[in-house]
Image (cartoon, grey):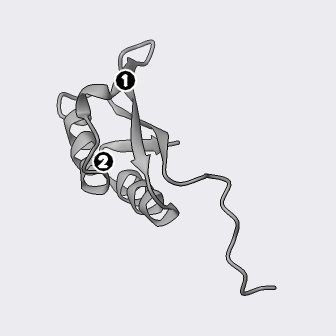
Amino acid sequence: MADEPKASLIEFPCAFPLKIMGVKVDAFAQTVAEVVLRHDASFDPATIEMRPSSRGTYLSLTCTVWAVSQPQLDDLYRELSSHPMVKVVL
């Protein structure tokens, strides 16, 4: 039983929203879009939803990607969360 693959709670392929938060700087949204495009060539950066924090210090981006597999999402999450401009990925 230990060798059985884990059952995924996500049914692939699907539209999968990711929330990415970082300090509000001019290049943040463009940088995130470039990372997302490396993992989902069909992603349209014009669809990014942006919400500044109440004090305007941080920016929250919601990017909905076309997820085809768990490894694709894992790789995207790892690249985003290791980027110096990104504080949190949900």
On the picture, is 43 further left or further right than 18? left
Q: Residue flagged by tag 1: what amino acid is it?
A: Glu
Q: Is residue 15 above or below residue 51?
A: below
Query: N-terminal of the two: label 2 or label 1?
Result: 2
- Residue 84 image position (x, y, % from top left): 30, 50
For the N terminus, the quadrant is bottom right
- Give SS at disc 1: strand
- Residue 10 image position (x, y, % from top left): 61, 52
Q: Is residue 3 above or below residue 90?
A: below
> Mark 1 Cα within 10 Å, few/some/many (few <14, many 20+)?
few
- Residue 87 image position (x, y, % from top left): 42, 42
Residue shown at the point (44%, 57%) measured from the top left: 68
Query: Residue 4 bears which disc, if any?
Result: none
* Farthest residue, direction top: 54
Residue shown at the point (36%, 43%) measured from the top left: 86
Residue 9 picture quarter: bottom right
Query: Residue 49 bears which disc, if any?
Result: 1
- Give SS at disc 2: helix
Residue 51 picture quarter: top left
Seen from the viewer's position, the closer of residues 16 and 19 is 16
Q: Where is mark 2, residue-wise?
A: 36
Residue shown at the point (27%, 45%) measured from the top left: 42
Q: Is residue 1 above or below residue 39?
A: below
